Amino acid sequence: MTGKPLGIAATIVVVSLLGACAQTKSLVASMGSQSTPSDETIVLGAPDAEHYLAELYDLAVGDPLTQAEIYADAESGAKLTPGPQTNLRYALVLATPGHERFNPEIAQTMLRDVLLQESILTAAEISLATIHLNSVERQLALSADARRALASSSLAATTEGAAVQQRLAAAEAENRRLREALTDAEEKLDALSSIERSIREQDQ
């Protein structure tokens, strides 16, 4: 083609190429946005946050029988099918105060181990583990401070008690010395009185 028809054809080709490029760019952008992973890790079979929270609520307000059942179920799950979710559940039960099996020391160790497996935990599970780990660590720190304060006060009381005992012993020793001196003086006075009577009797 020559002349004007050739120019029109060239224009149509350029427009078509530009449109194809735009569609390709749009498609790539769409695919990129669809392939970008979300912040929320999806773990198949993982309980949701409500499940953990509901059980912890029942554990906190339940009667001793309910608490024992929850603990036994969590413990058996962690022992029979150990994994991040079952270990987290058991650790959360151990970290919750208000029941007989509350054990912040073991909970601290288990929660630390669970958080080492963040890649296979949901964001909610990571949050729960982190919050309860911070809580038990504070409880353990406060308990340690209380023990140190008690030991310090006991030592101070023991030291003061020993000082008091020493003062009492010294006072008792001084009292014995004074009694002995008084007795000796009385004996000497009696001896002098006896001598005086003897002298008077001889004079008479």
Image (tube, rainbow, N blue to C red):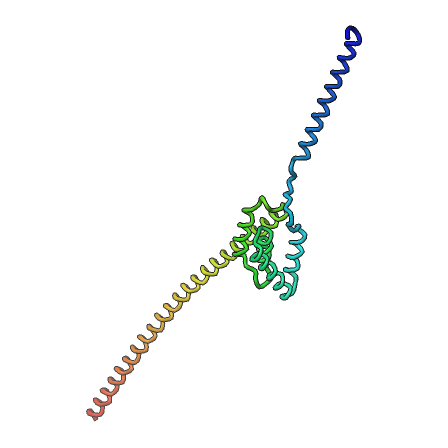
Q: Quadrant of the C terminus?
A: bottom left
Image coordinates of residue 187 in percent, x first then y, are: 27, 83
Q: Residue furthest front?
A: 1
Relative depth, front residue between 113 and 9: 9
Q: Residue furthest bottom?
A: 204
Residue at x-position 39% and y-position 66%:
162
Is residue 186 something one can see in this rendering? Answer: yes
**In this rendering, position of residue 199 left or right of residue 172:** left
The number of numbered badges drawn on the structure is: 0
Residue at x-position 22% and y-position 87%:
195
Give residue 166's quadrant in the image. Answer: bottom left
Image coordinates of residue 180 in percent, x first then y, are: 30, 78
Relative depth, front residue between 163 and 156: 156
Image coordinates of residue 117 in percent, x first then y, are: 56, 46
Q: Quadrant of the N terminus?
A: top right
Residue at x-position 65% and y-position 57%:
55
Give residue 76's quadrant in the image. Answer: bottom right
Relative depth, front residue between 152 and 90: 90
